[in-house]
Amino acid sequence: MQLLKIYWLVLLLCLIVSPGSFAALNITFINPGFAKQHDTSANSTGEFWYKVASSMQAAANDLDINLTIHFASRNHIEMKALIAQAIKSKPDYLILVDEKKVLSDYLVSIKTNNIPIYFLLNRPDEVKLRMLKQHNIDVIGSVVPGNRDGGYKLAQALYQQHQKRHVGKMNILALLGDHTTSAAIKRRAGLDDFLATHPDVTIVAEDVANWSMEQSFSKTLAFLNAVPNVNAIWCANDAIGFGAINALNTQQRRESAVVGGFNWDKAPLTNMNLDVSMGGHVLLGAYAMIAISDEIKKPQQFSLKHEDLTFFTEKTPKAQQLIEHINQGKLHKIDFSKFSRSQAHPLKFTVDNLAKEIENAL
């Protein structure tokens, strides 16, 4: 009997200390966008945020992370409620998006229980970050794409397309995301940078389309009637671009203007393809998973910080396989653990390397 008790005690100790028994890392992501929907009429802003979630889940699977994702469906009241619920569940890390700059004051107004917070794609500005620190909100880092550089690159690519197809000045209709989100503001600033060095380019009309294909369609129709010399449409995302093309098609004027946006989205109809799409930033959710995992494994060597990555890449045939896998939600073909800096020979997290991993998997 005594031997039997000793046997069970030894077995219990083995289970407790075995490598597989350690609790996995628990991360919660409050996604500001929509979950995957079959009825796209409920979401005219495109599937960018769903694809961000998909890339994060693929990376989390490779890194042994328990990732919980809640979608706020572009509803800021719902987003705040989801944050409050997430804090009660006490994840190891909470990933947030400061869309329309609504989160800083809210975080100060609630108890965050010292849960580490990481901002993805949109973070509070320096003033708000200092305020959060003063209120002991544990913001541990962030990653955002080079939105200003992206705004410049989109304008430059449209300019090159315009020169191939048209003669004379480029007259831009600028359709912005919104008035307050950091990504929208910085992309617009990048357009200004381009204008400063190209006197033969003019903005002839400008408005916000709230990231929406529907709003873009109606506003572009109005501008095409009011400002008929528009021959280029710079859009803050691809959904806005698709709405602009729909308006051009309605007036049988598609060939009169080059149109570009951001996100590498698949066109909803075959006659709505963009002339330019800048993308890659959809993968930064996966980068966030890797960065947090590395910090856990080697905190002294890979401590989290605020990062601005120059990541925007024009949609080209070279990246086509990667883009198709992103849009089809098939990023599980990439082994994201290869990009962990805790590995002996990690791959650098770049669009080119991610594209090569897809090619190798085919």
Image (cartoon, rainbow, N blue to C red):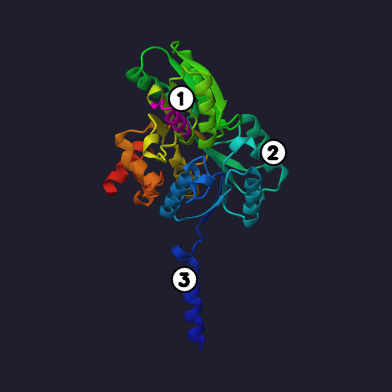
Q: Crowdedness of circle 1 by 10 Å Cα count: few (<14), some, many (20+)?
A: many
Position in image of residue 283 (x %, y %): 43, 41
Residue drawn where x is 64% and y is 40% of the image: 103
Query: Which residue is at the far bottom?
Result: 1
Question: Which residue, given by chain and number where applicable, does mark 2 sit on?
Answer: 105
Residue type at mark 1 is Ile
Question: Which residue, given by chain and number where applicable, does mark 3 sit on?
Answer: 14
Residue type at mark 2 is Asp
* Picture layout, residue 251 above or below residue 69: above
| Image depth: mark 3 or mark 2 in front | 2
Residue 325 placement, left or right of 111: left
Query: Which residue is at the far right?
Result: 109
Give the Cα distance between marks 1 and 2.
Answer: 35 Å
* Picture layout, residue 234 above or below residue 134: above
Q: In terms of image quadrants, where is residue 277?
A: top left
Whether residue 346 is visible here, answered yes or no, is no
Taken as a whole, is the magenta stretch helix, strand or loop? helix
Residue type at mark 3 is Cys
Q: Is residue 251 covered in magenta?
A: yes
Looking at the rendering, the stretch of residues picked out in magenta corresponds to 243-254
What is the secondary structure assignment of the residue under circle 2?
A: helix
Residue drawn where x is 42% and y is 39% of the image: 265
Question: Which residue, given by chain and number where applicable, does mark 1 sit on?
Answer: 233
Give the Cα distance between marks 1 and 3.
Answer: 64 Å
First of labels 1, 2 by sequence position = 2
What is the secondary structure assignment of the residue under circle 3?
A: helix
